[in-house]
Image (tube, rainbow, N blue to C red):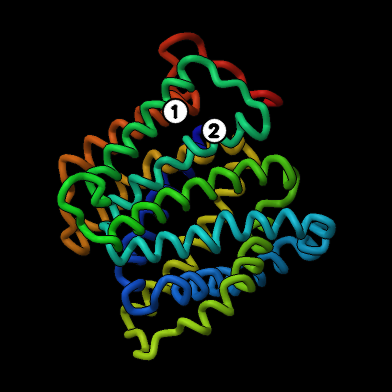
Amino acid sequence: MKGRDRLELLLLAAVWGGSFLFMRVAAPAFGASPLSAVRVAVASAVLLPLLQWMQPGALAACRGRWGALAVVGLLNSALPFVCFSFAAQYLSGGLAAIFNATTPLWGALVARLWLGERLDASRLLGLALGFAGVLGLAWDKAGLKSGTQGAGTALAVLACLAAPLMYGVAANATRRWLTGTPALALATGSQLVATLALAPAAALAWPAQPPGALDWAAALALGVLCTGVAYVMYFGLIARVGPARATTVTYLVPMFAMLWGGLALGERVTPSMLGGGAVILLGTSLATGWWRPFGAARKEPGR
Protein backbone atom coordinates (compact mmCIF):
# COMPACT_ATOMS: atom_id res chain seq x y z
CA MET A 1 0.00 0.00 0.00
CA LYS A 2 1.26 3.47 -0.90
CA GLY A 3 1.33 6.39 1.51
CA ARG A 4 -1.85 7.84 0.02
CA ASP A 5 -3.65 4.53 0.49
CA ARG A 6 -2.61 4.27 4.14
CA LEU A 7 -3.74 7.84 4.84
CA GLU A 8 -7.08 7.20 3.17
CA LEU A 9 -7.45 3.99 5.16
CA LEU A 10 -6.94 5.94 8.41
CA LEU A 11 -9.43 8.63 7.41
CA LEU A 12 -11.98 6.03 6.38
CA ALA A 13 -11.58 4.28 9.74
CA ALA A 14 -12.26 7.56 11.57
CA VAL A 15 -15.39 8.16 9.50
CA TRP A 16 -16.72 4.63 9.92
CA GLY A 17 -15.90 4.74 13.63
CA GLY A 18 -18.23 7.73 13.79
CA SER A 19 -21.01 5.73 12.15
CA PHE A 20 -21.38 3.62 15.30
CA LEU A 21 -21.84 6.79 17.35
CA PHE A 22 -24.47 8.15 14.95
CA MET A 23 -26.37 4.85 14.97
CA ARG A 24 -26.34 4.83 18.78
CA VAL A 25 -27.94 8.29 18.72
CA ALA A 26 -30.52 7.76 15.97
CA ALA A 27 -31.47 4.06 16.06
CA PRO A 28 -33.72 4.22 19.16
CA ALA A 29 -35.80 6.99 17.57
CA PHE A 30 -35.99 5.65 14.01
CA GLY A 31 -35.73 1.88 14.40
CA ALA A 32 -33.35 -0.31 12.40
CA SER A 33 -35.04 -0.45 8.99
CA PRO A 34 -36.17 3.20 8.77
CA LEU A 35 -32.76 4.51 9.85
CA SER A 36 -30.98 2.29 7.34
CA ALA A 37 -33.37 3.38 4.58
CA VAL A 38 -32.77 7.05 5.36
CA ARG A 39 -29.04 6.41 5.38
CA VAL A 40 -28.89 4.83 1.92
CA ALA A 41 -31.46 7.24 0.43
CA VAL A 42 -29.42 10.23 1.58
CA ALA A 43 -26.25 8.61 0.28
CA SER A 44 -27.94 8.05 -3.10
CA ALA A 45 -29.07 11.68 -3.21
CA VAL A 46 -25.48 12.79 -2.59
CA LEU A 47 -23.79 10.36 -4.95
CA LEU A 48 -26.08 10.46 -7.98
CA PRO A 49 -25.59 14.14 -8.91
CA LEU A 50 -21.89 13.82 -8.07
CA LEU A 51 -21.62 10.89 -10.47
CA GLN A 52 -23.53 12.71 -13.20
CA TRP A 53 -21.23 15.72 -12.81
CA MET A 54 -17.90 13.89 -12.60
CA GLN A 55 -18.55 10.79 -14.74
CA PRO A 56 -21.64 11.32 -16.94
CA GLY A 57 -22.84 8.08 -18.44
CA ALA A 58 -20.97 5.95 -15.89
CA LEU A 59 -24.14 4.20 -14.70
CA ALA A 60 -25.02 3.34 -18.27
CA ALA A 61 -21.62 1.70 -18.53
CA CYS A 62 -22.76 -0.64 -15.74
CA ARG A 63 -25.33 -2.16 -18.09
CA GLY A 64 -25.08 -5.91 -17.78
CA ARG A 65 -23.66 -5.62 -14.26
CA TRP A 66 -26.81 -4.62 -12.40
CA GLY A 67 -27.24 -8.11 -11.01
CA ALA A 68 -23.81 -7.91 -9.42
CA LEU A 69 -24.51 -4.37 -8.21
CA ALA A 70 -27.73 -5.64 -6.62
CA VAL A 71 -25.81 -8.31 -4.72
CA VAL A 72 -23.23 -5.78 -3.52
CA GLY A 73 -25.92 -3.25 -2.62
CA LEU A 74 -27.76 -5.77 -0.48
CA LEU A 75 -24.72 -7.37 1.17
CA ASN A 76 -22.53 -4.29 1.56
CA SER A 77 -25.20 -1.77 2.57
CA ALA A 78 -28.87 -2.64 3.02
CA LEU A 79 -28.70 -5.75 5.21
CA PRO A 80 -25.55 -4.93 7.25
CA PHE A 81 -26.89 -1.44 8.01
CA VAL A 82 -30.09 -2.96 9.38
CA CYS A 83 -28.06 -5.41 11.47
CA PHE A 84 -25.86 -2.72 13.02
CA SER A 85 -28.76 -0.29 13.54
CA PHE A 86 -30.58 -3.02 15.44
CA ALA A 87 -27.47 -3.84 17.49
CA ALA A 88 -26.92 -0.15 18.31
CA GLN A 89 -30.00 -0.32 20.55
CA TYR A 90 -28.36 -2.95 22.78
CA LEU A 91 -24.55 -2.73 22.45
CA SER A 92 -22.03 0.08 22.76
CA GLY A 93 -20.57 1.45 19.56
CA GLY A 94 -17.10 0.25 20.51
CA LEU A 95 -18.25 -3.33 21.05
CA ALA A 96 -20.19 -3.39 17.76
CA ALA A 97 -17.09 -2.07 15.99
CA ILE A 98 -14.96 -4.84 17.51
CA PHE A 99 -17.33 -7.44 16.08
CA ASN A 100 -17.20 -5.53 12.79
CA ALA A 101 -13.43 -6.06 12.85
CA THR A 102 -14.04 -9.70 11.91
CA THR A 103 -14.80 -8.55 8.35
CA PRO A 104 -11.29 -9.43 7.05
CA LEU A 105 -11.56 -12.87 8.68
CA TRP A 106 -14.78 -13.56 6.82
CA GLY A 107 -13.29 -12.02 3.69
CA ALA A 108 -10.27 -14.35 3.85
CA LEU A 109 -12.47 -17.38 4.47
CA VAL A 110 -14.83 -16.50 1.61
CA ALA A 111 -11.85 -15.85 -0.69
CA ARG A 112 -10.53 -19.32 0.11
CA LEU A 113 -13.84 -21.09 -0.43
CA TRP A 114 -15.03 -19.07 -3.42
CA LEU A 115 -11.97 -17.68 -5.21
CA GLY A 116 -9.56 -20.45 -4.27
CA GLU A 117 -7.01 -18.23 -2.49
CA ARG A 118 -4.41 -20.25 -0.65
CA LEU A 119 -4.29 -20.10 3.15
CA ASP A 120 -0.85 -20.90 4.57
CA ALA A 121 -0.06 -21.79 8.19
CA SER A 122 -0.03 -18.16 9.36
CA ARG A 123 -3.40 -17.38 7.81
CA LEU A 124 -5.01 -20.56 9.16
CA LEU A 125 -3.71 -19.71 12.62
CA GLY A 126 -5.10 -16.21 12.20
CA LEU A 127 -8.57 -17.50 11.35
CA ALA A 128 -8.52 -19.76 14.41
CA LEU A 129 -7.36 -16.97 16.74
CA GLY A 130 -9.78 -14.43 15.31
CA PHE A 131 -12.83 -16.62 15.69
CA ALA A 132 -11.68 -17.63 19.18
CA GLY A 133 -11.70 -13.95 20.12
CA VAL A 134 -15.20 -13.60 18.67
CA LEU A 135 -16.44 -16.60 20.65
CA GLY A 136 -14.94 -15.16 23.83
CA LEU A 137 -16.69 -11.82 23.38
CA ALA A 138 -19.97 -13.47 22.42
CA TRP A 139 -19.75 -15.75 25.45
CA ASP A 140 -19.27 -12.71 27.67
CA LYS A 141 -21.77 -10.34 26.07
CA ALA A 142 -24.59 -12.41 24.58
CA GLY A 143 -25.71 -14.33 27.61
CA LEU A 144 -23.89 -17.49 26.57
CA LYS A 145 -22.36 -17.74 30.02
CA SER A 146 -24.39 -18.31 33.20
CA GLY A 147 -26.61 -15.36 33.99
CA THR A 148 -28.20 -14.45 30.68
CA GLN A 149 -28.26 -10.77 29.70
CA GLY A 150 -31.40 -11.00 27.61
CA ALA A 151 -32.47 -12.18 24.20
CA GLY A 152 -32.07 -8.69 22.74
CA THR A 153 -28.37 -8.61 23.52
CA ALA A 154 -27.86 -12.09 22.11
CA LEU A 155 -29.65 -11.16 18.88
CA ALA A 156 -27.59 -7.95 18.70
CA VAL A 157 -24.36 -9.97 18.87
CA LEU A 158 -25.61 -12.32 16.15
CA ALA A 159 -26.50 -9.30 14.02
CA CYS A 160 -23.00 -7.90 14.56
CA LEU A 161 -21.53 -11.18 13.27
CA ALA A 162 -23.92 -11.54 10.31
CA ALA A 163 -23.04 -8.05 9.05
CA PRO A 164 -19.26 -8.57 8.65
CA LEU A 165 -19.89 -11.95 7.03
CA MET A 166 -21.98 -10.13 4.42
CA TYR A 167 -19.25 -7.50 4.05
CA GLY A 168 -16.71 -10.25 3.38
CA VAL A 169 -18.91 -11.82 0.69
CA ALA A 170 -19.57 -8.40 -0.87
CA ALA A 171 -15.86 -7.52 -1.05
CA ASN A 172 -15.10 -10.74 -2.90
CA ALA A 173 -18.16 -10.30 -5.15
CA THR A 174 -16.85 -6.86 -6.06
CA ARG A 175 -13.49 -8.37 -6.94
CA ARG A 176 -15.04 -11.25 -8.90
CA TRP A 177 -17.73 -9.44 -10.89
CA LEU A 178 -17.12 -5.69 -10.75
CA THR A 179 -13.40 -5.26 -11.31
CA GLY A 180 -12.90 -2.26 -13.58
CA THR A 181 -16.17 -0.58 -12.60
CA PRO A 182 -15.52 3.07 -11.61
CA ALA A 183 -15.58 3.44 -7.84
CA LEU A 184 -18.11 6.26 -7.90
CA ALA A 185 -20.49 4.31 -10.17
CA LEU A 186 -20.12 1.26 -7.94
CA ALA A 187 -20.88 3.25 -4.80
CA THR A 188 -23.85 5.02 -6.39
CA GLY A 189 -25.38 1.92 -7.95
CA SER A 190 -25.10 -0.09 -4.75
CA GLN A 191 -26.81 2.67 -2.72
CA LEU A 192 -29.65 2.96 -5.24
CA VAL A 193 -30.23 -0.79 -4.99
CA ALA A 194 -30.13 -0.62 -1.19
CA THR A 195 -32.64 2.25 -1.18
CA LEU A 196 -35.12 0.32 -3.29
CA ALA A 197 -34.66 -2.81 -1.17
CA LEU A 198 -35.23 -1.06 2.17
CA ALA A 199 -38.03 1.32 1.21
CA PRO A 200 -40.96 -1.09 1.80
CA ALA A 201 -39.75 -2.27 5.21
CA ALA A 202 -38.99 1.32 6.26
CA ALA A 203 -42.48 2.48 5.29
CA LEU A 204 -44.10 -0.29 7.32
CA ALA A 205 -41.88 0.30 10.39
CA TRP A 206 -41.75 4.11 10.32
CA PRO A 207 -41.94 5.39 13.93
CA ALA A 208 -45.22 6.85 15.14
CA GLN A 209 -43.30 9.42 17.24
CA PRO A 210 -41.37 11.71 14.87
CA PRO A 211 -37.59 11.61 15.45
CA GLY A 212 -36.07 14.77 16.90
CA ALA A 213 -33.61 17.22 15.35
CA LEU A 214 -30.58 15.48 16.86
CA ASP A 215 -31.79 12.11 15.54
CA TRP A 216 -32.18 13.55 12.04
CA ALA A 217 -28.76 15.18 12.23
CA ALA A 218 -27.20 11.82 13.11
CA ALA A 219 -29.13 10.09 10.30
CA LEU A 220 -28.00 12.69 7.77
CA ALA A 221 -24.40 12.35 8.93
CA LEU A 222 -24.70 8.60 8.41
CA GLY A 223 -25.94 9.11 4.87
CA VAL A 224 -23.68 11.90 3.67
CA LEU A 225 -20.40 11.22 5.44
CA CYS A 226 -20.39 7.62 6.65
CA THR A 227 -22.00 6.17 3.52
CA GLY A 228 -21.78 8.46 0.50
CA VAL A 229 -18.28 9.81 0.99
CA ALA A 230 -16.97 6.72 2.76
CA TYR A 231 -18.05 4.25 0.07
CA VAL A 232 -16.36 6.21 -2.69
CA MET A 233 -13.16 5.94 -0.63
CA TYR A 234 -13.73 2.26 0.13
CA PHE A 235 -14.44 1.07 -3.40
CA GLY A 236 -11.48 3.13 -4.59
CA LEU A 237 -9.26 1.29 -2.12
CA ILE A 238 -10.60 -2.08 -3.30
CA ALA A 239 -9.74 -1.12 -6.88
CA ARG A 240 -6.20 -0.01 -5.96
CA VAL A 241 -5.09 -2.47 -3.28
CA GLY A 242 -7.57 -5.39 -3.47
CA PRO A 243 -10.40 -6.49 -1.13
CA ALA A 244 -8.17 -8.29 1.39
CA ARG A 245 -6.18 -5.14 2.14
CA ALA A 246 -9.11 -2.74 1.82
CA THR A 247 -11.15 -4.59 4.45
CA THR A 248 -8.28 -4.16 6.94
CA VAL A 249 -9.78 -0.71 7.56
CA THR A 250 -11.77 -2.58 10.20
CA TYR A 251 -8.53 -2.97 12.19
CA LEU A 252 -8.75 0.72 13.00
CA VAL A 253 -12.51 1.32 13.21
CA PRO A 254 -12.90 0.00 16.82
CA MET A 255 -10.27 2.45 18.08
CA PHE A 256 -12.19 5.39 16.63
CA ALA A 257 -15.59 3.99 17.60
CA MET A 258 -14.49 3.67 21.23
CA LEU A 259 -12.95 7.16 21.11
CA TRP A 260 -16.06 8.86 19.69
CA GLY A 261 -18.40 6.84 21.94
CA GLY A 262 -16.37 7.69 25.03
CA LEU A 263 -16.16 11.40 24.21
CA ALA A 264 -19.79 11.87 23.14
CA LEU A 265 -21.76 9.28 25.13
CA GLY A 266 -19.45 8.33 27.98
CA GLU A 267 -19.36 4.70 26.85
CA ARG A 268 -17.09 2.51 28.96
CA VAL A 269 -14.37 0.29 27.53
CA THR A 270 -14.28 -3.00 29.47
CA PRO A 271 -11.34 -5.39 29.93
CA SER A 272 -13.22 -8.10 28.01
CA MET A 273 -13.64 -5.74 25.06
CA LEU A 274 -9.94 -4.91 25.05
CA GLY A 275 -8.90 -8.55 25.43
CA GLY A 276 -11.31 -9.94 22.87
CA GLY A 277 -10.56 -7.12 20.47
CA ALA A 278 -6.81 -7.70 20.76
CA VAL A 279 -7.21 -11.41 19.96
CA ILE A 280 -9.49 -10.62 17.00
CA LEU A 281 -7.06 -8.06 15.60
CA LEU A 282 -4.11 -10.41 16.07
CA GLY A 283 -5.97 -13.15 14.25
CA THR A 284 -7.04 -10.74 11.52
CA SER A 285 -3.47 -9.52 10.95
CA LEU A 286 -2.39 -13.13 10.45
CA ALA A 287 -5.39 -14.17 8.36
CA THR A 288 -4.97 -11.29 5.91
CA GLY A 289 -1.19 -11.68 5.61
CA TRP A 290 -0.22 -8.40 7.27
CA TRP A 291 1.94 -10.34 9.72
CA ARG A 292 3.59 -13.64 8.73
CA PRO A 293 5.66 -15.11 11.56
CA PHE A 294 6.19 -18.38 9.63
CA GLY A 295 7.48 -17.01 6.37
CA ALA A 296 7.91 -14.07 4.06
CA ALA A 297 4.89 -12.19 2.77
CA ARG A 298 3.44 -13.79 -0.30
CA LYS A 299 2.27 -11.77 -3.26
CA GLU A 300 -1.48 -11.88 -3.82
CA PRO A 301 -2.60 -13.77 -6.92
CA GLY A 302 -2.99 -11.45 -9.87
CA ARG A 303 -1.29 -8.50 -8.14
Q: Nearer the viewer, residue 31 or 8?
A: 31
Instruction: In the rendered view, tell whether residue 2 sits above or below residue 227.
Output: above
Q: Position of residue 253 (x, y in %)?
A: 37, 46
Q: Amino acid at mark 2?
A: Leu
State which tag comes first along the sequence, 2 or 1: 2
User: Is 17 left or right of 294, judged from the image as shown?
Assistant: left
- From mark 2 to mark 1, how far is it between C-alphas? 8 Å
At 39% from the left and 78% from the top, the residue drawn is 30
Q: Check disc 1 and report its element: helix, strand or loop.
A: helix
Q: Tell me, yes or no, whether the two marked residues, 2 and 1, touch with CB atoms within 8 Å.
A: yes
Residue name at image x 35 percent, y 84 percent: 211
Q: Residues within 10 Å of mark 1 (few under 14, many from 20)?
A: many
- Above or below residue 41? Residue 226 is above
Instruction: Depth check: give the residue in front, 39 or 225.
Output: 39
Q: Amino acid at mark 1?
A: Leu
Farthest-out residue, front: 146
Q: Residue at x 46, y 81 (%)?
A: 205
Q: Which mark is residue 109?
A: 2
Q: Quadrant of the N terminus?
A: top right
Q: Which residue is mark 1?
A: 127
Position of residue 50 in the picture relative to residue 27 (left or right): right
User: Which residue appears at 35% of the width and 66% of the height?
Assistant: 22
